[in-house]
Structures are given as structure tokens and as C-alpha cells.
Amino acid sequence: MNFAPEPALPLAWPVDLSPDRLAITEANRAAAAWLASPGLWPVPVTLVVGPAGSGKTHLARWFAARSPARVIETADREDPESLFHAWNAATRQAPLLLTSQLIPRDWRHGLPDLASRLAATPLVKLGEPDDELLTAVLGKLFAERGVRVGDDLIRWLVVRIERSLVAAQAVVAALDAAALARRRAITIPLAREVVDGQGEFGF
């Protein structure tokens, strides 16, 4: 029986960022170790900076699940006065975690008192996910769906999809949907059809 080609999938997939799904590898191990010990921070605030898809949100949720912390994402877009008061309200018992794609000197808040607070805030930098992290995330995502795939498929995906955790979530969801629709196993030929047909994966 022949199956008609699947229509293009939507650009946005629901992304599960549950804390217990965080994969820790060399790419984010130092950041996770720092966030795991807020009592050792010089001030009760930390800023995590990294490009889109580098895992800032997932780390932030992992951190918040481990401590009674407040998290402010995309802090560079926050109202400066509100951010200033949030910084001042942070304590050892209730630390504050900020995330941003920009380092503080590129924030356009125009508030000197906030600038001085940010200058005293420890900065944790995340880069794009490396091969080890993408491999671990892809393997975990397939396993959680009950899908068995070969290591060769994961290696093929790692060097072809956009280097972001959101892209990893998206491509696994797309492959699972395509395999179910076409009643095929998830193999490199199927992955080639899906990835080549969906430009948002960053081939």
C-alpha cells in the first residue's frame, strides 16, 4: 500500500522541559554544578547567558525544582525597576536566577543602580550544545517515546540538525509522527526525507 506524503509539519512543537529530563554533559556540567550550590555564590543571584536553544530554560527549571528560587528569563527585556527590586530581594534562602542571550553590558536599561548590581552578579555562559549533549538528548527523547533507533541514526542527526535542544525535540517528534503515519521504522532514509523536507531543522 502506498501512503501519500505527509504535509509539512508546523514550525512549533510542544517542548517538554521537565527538570528530570535535563541531560548533563561536558557542555553544561560546569553550569549545572554552579547552580547546584547557590549557598556558595558570592551574592544570591546568578545570570546564565547563552544563545537560543542552548538549554537556558531547561537549566533554569532544573534549578528552580531544587531550591525555592525565583527565575526571570530574558531578563534583559524585564522592566529595569522591577529587575532592580528583584535583585535586592534575593536571599540565600530564596536566590534569584536570571537568563539572557545578552551579557549585561549589552542590556539597554539605562539604570545605573541596576548596572552596578549586574556587575556584581556571577555570570555563567552556555555555548551551543556539543555533540555529546545532542547525542544524549536525542537518545533520551527517543527512549522516552518508546522508540528504538540505531546509534548510526543519532550520529547522522547530530551533524545535520540545528545545534539546539529545541531542534532536537522537534526532529524527534517529527520522525516519530512520520514513522507512525507511514508505518515505517525510524531509519536514516526516513530521517533524510523528514530533515530534508523541513528547513527549520537547520540542515
Image (spheres, rainbow, N blue to C red):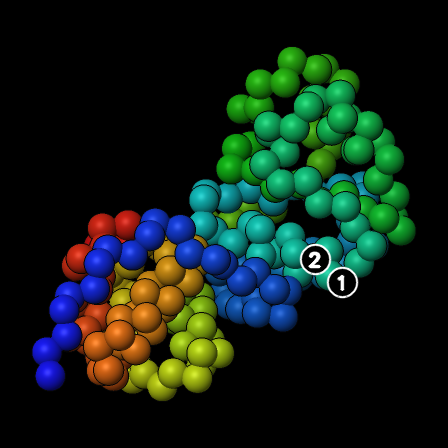
Q: Position of residue 119 (x, y in %)?
A: 69, 29
User: Residue extending furthest left?
Assistant: 2
Badge 1 element: helix
Residue sitting at x 24%, y 82%: 183
Q: Position of residue 51 (x, y in %)?
A: 45, 43
Badge 2 element: helix
Could you tell whether 5 is left or right of 19 in the image? Answer: left
Q: Is residue 129 visible?
A: no
Q: Position of residue 35 (x, y in %)?
A: 69, 56
Above or below, 41 against 106 in this view is below
Could you tell whether 203 is left or right of 175 in the image? Answer: left
Which amino acid, mark 2? Answer: Phe
Q: Is residue 27 visible?
A: yes
Residue sitting at x 45%, y 69%: 137
Above or below, 66 against 199 in this view is below
Image quadrant where residue 166 sits? bottom left
Q: Which residue is identified by label 1?
A: 66
Above or below, 178 against 11 in this view is below
Quadrant where the N terminus lies?
Answer: bottom left
Which amino acid, mark 1? Answer: Arg
Could you tell whether 187 is left or right of 122 in the image? Answer: left
Residue sitting at x 61%, y 56%: 59
Tally of marks: 2
Whether pointer 2 and pointer 1 mark residues with C-beta atoms closer than 8 Å, the reply is yes
Q: Which residue is identified by label 2?
A: 63
Q: Position of residue 81 (x, y in %)?
A: 75, 21
Quadrant where the C terminus lies?
Answer: bottom left
